[in-house]
Amino acid sequence: MGFYICSRNKRNRLTAGRLYECSIAYYGRTPYLYCTDDSGKQRIYPEAYFVEAGVSFAGKAQTHTQSKQQEEYSHV
């Protein structure tokens, strides 16, 4: 089980930007995420609908750090 951030809105089911706790489930060789959605039901969704929380937060932090460094160098 892990934490994933939804990357798409699905009416009454998923909200983009929201953190969900999911398990990976395979159908054949294709990975899906099994989680409780906004309606309170447990469903299986394509893995492409989510980004692993650690990956997303790390990417945002790196982008923020790079933009701050560029600001500092532009003032010199």
Image: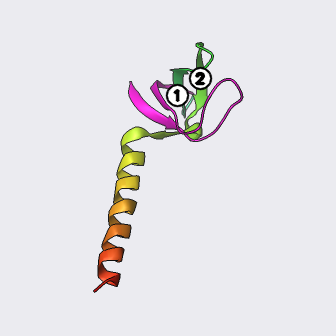
Q: Amino acid at mark 1?
A: Leu
Magenta highlight range: 1-27
Q: Quadrant of the N terminus?
A: top left
Closer-to-camera residue (3/65): 65
Residue under pointer 1: 33
Q: Amino acid at mark 2?
A: Ile
The kind of secondary structure element at disc 1 is strand
Q: Earlier in the sequence, mark 2 or mark 1?
A: 1
Percent coordinates x, y for residue 51 in the rendering = 48, 41
Q: CA distance from mark 2 to mark 1?
A: 6 Å
Percent coordinates x, y for residue 45 in the rendering = 60, 28
Q: Is residue 75 above or below residue 4?
A: below
Which disc is residue 44 wearing? Answer: 2
Q: Quadrant of residue 12?
A: top right
Mark 2 crowd level (few <14, some 14–19, many ≥20, 10 Å Cα): some
Q: Quadrant of residue 8?
A: top right
Which disc is residue 72 wearing? Answer: none
Mark 1 crowd level (few <14, some 14–19, many ≥20, 10 Å Cα): many
Q: Is residue 42 left or right of residue 65?
A: right
Q: Residue at x 58, y 13 (%)?
A: 40
Closer-to-camera residue (55/66): 66
Q: Residue furthest front?
A: 75
Percent coordinates x, y for residue 54 in the rendering = 36, 42
Q: Is residue 11 left or right of residue 52?
A: right
Percent coordinates x, y for residue 9 in the rendering = 66, 36
Q: Quadrant of residue 70?
A: bottom left
Tell me if residue 12 is in the magenta stretch.
Answer: yes
Q: Is residue 64 left or right of residue 6?
A: left
* Circles 2 and 1 in contact, beta carbons < 8 Å: yes
Q: Is residue 35 above or below residue 18?
A: above
Q: Residue at x 52, y 28 (%)?
A: 33
